[in-house]
Amino acid sequence: MSWLWTTEDMIAVMAGRPFGTLPEGITGISIDSRSITPGEAFFAIKGDRVDGHDYASMAMANGASLLIVSEARLPAMGRLTVPMIVVEDVLAALGRLGLASRERSRARIIAVTGSVGKTTTKEMLRHVLSPSGKVHASVASFNNHWGVPLTLARMPEDTDYGVFEVGMNHPGEIRPLVAMIRPDVAIITTIAPAHLGNFKNIKEIAAAKAEIFEGLEPGGHVVLNRDNDQFNFLDRTAQSLGIEHIHSFGQHAKAEFRLAEFNGSDENSTLWLTIGGETLEVALGAPGRHIAENALAALGVVRIVGADMQKAIEALATLRPEKGRGKRHRLVIGGGSFTLIDESYNANPASMRAAIALLAASEPTGRGRRIAVLGDMLEMGEYAQKVHTDLAVPLLAAGIEHVWLAGAEMAALKESLPESVHVEYRENTSELTDYVLNSVAPGDVLMVKSSLGIGFGKIVAALLDKFPPFADTQREF
């Protein structure tokens, strides 16, 4: 049996004490009692809303072979006689296991941060590096104070490439995470006004993202977006920390990984990448210029770490957008179909503009309409009214004539759109969901986007529940 960790090593690393008859080792780590699989260890982390100790018995019932629990909660565990490692603090113990995982690993480690495109770039790196070796990457958006140590602790010892996403809402949050990850390559996808309510200005956001440089391994590499207004600041910051290998991507003439040309369509796109003195044609299995820009960074990393470039390019042709991040659904309605673009995972001004551009590039059929279904962008603070009002500019430039809105902040956008745009506004997601379900028509293209907390995923789910997927064998009349 190939163990992720032996229990002997776990006890030593986490400064824990065994309770009961422990298994020889574990095959995986989980913090979710619902999705745990046989042979895994369950870490009973106390979160903001729930305490994992309350779900320990469920974790065992679902196949957990070992529990990691805190000393303070042990008396409340009742008469559970299951194998446990008892520690002072479960999250701290997970952190120590993550540090040990990084210490034992010989993998090339890549860390990704940025205001937009972190998860997409992380998944793209997983995709393009897989043909060259064993890749371990964070699940979903596990990019915070528990997601990073969990991803590290889950990394198998024989991993060739480790890809980690690093997020933040406030200054100082990236610093301790990157100190754990210790990347060989650090990427900043872009700097944009996300979480603007927690910062004075965009420069403060850039400074917070630049914390990723501080954990870089000696001789490590930095990859920056040369088209972004904060490039010079980030470049200077990296140099001031003694980082010698600073690379750039984008359309800028001086970008090392340069977008020479881009050709997009509804379902996919093609880019021409100039890298190392040659121009390469790259077919992408996903639409959108912003996706192409992420691909530049990913292929730049392929070059930096010495992975197989040709295999990486071939892999990009099979890339598909993920749920909530541009995934497309063609759904049956009446005697035809409509297209749903699911951008519901999150939103800030930059990603809103990218999603609007994606909608503009999509072609309705018949008498169909391009419809932007938009909800509030959260954490904008005193800038909230302005950033929502400003969305009128890209909507009008893209020729979007149908805009369906919900949320308190979106009232500002409603007021700023001219009468030539057909606007439907509802106060909350539930009311807008009802309207969308009853108003979508054959040939339409709907793009749904909001911050995660607004819950526009419910609109997507309702559409997928009501309208069946369109099969290639079906014909439209």
Image: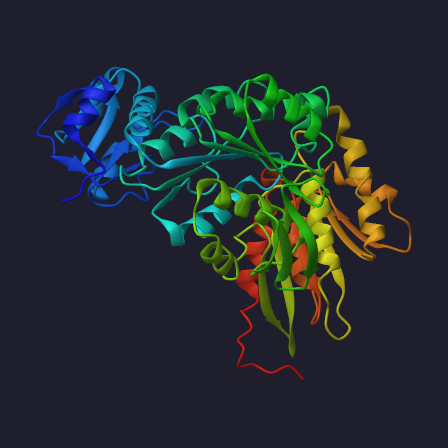
Instruction: Identify whether 429 is placed above or below 328.
Output: above
Seen in the image, is 309 located left or right of residue 160?
Answer: right
Q: Provide residue 362's location: percent of width, then percent of height.
A: 71, 63
Give residue 148's quadrant in the image: top left
Q: Provide residue 202's location: percent of width, then percent of height.
A: 71, 26
Q: Name the outermost residue toward the front.
A: 277
Q: Name the outermost residue toward the right.
A: 419
Seen in the image, is 79 located left or right of residue 405?
Answer: left
Q: Provide residue 398's location: percent of width, then percent of height.
A: 81, 54
Q: How many marks?
A: 0
In-front residue for pair 7/210:
210
Q: Provide residue 352's location: percent of width, then percent of height.
A: 70, 44
Q: Name the outermost residue toward the left.
A: 21
Q: Quadrant of the C terminus?
A: bottom right
Instruction: Identify whether 103 is placed above or below 15.
Output: below
Q: Residue at x 69, y 57 (%)?
A: 262
Q: How is the image coloured?
A: rainbow
Is residue 78 in sight in this rendering? no
Give residue 369's quadrant in the image: bottom right
Q: Residue at x 74, y 32 (%)?
A: 229
Instruction: Identify whether 146 is placed above or below 410.
Output: above
Is residue 421 in sight in this rendering? yes
Q: Quadrant of the N terminus?
A: top left
Instruction: Identify whether 152 is placed above or below 123.
Output: above
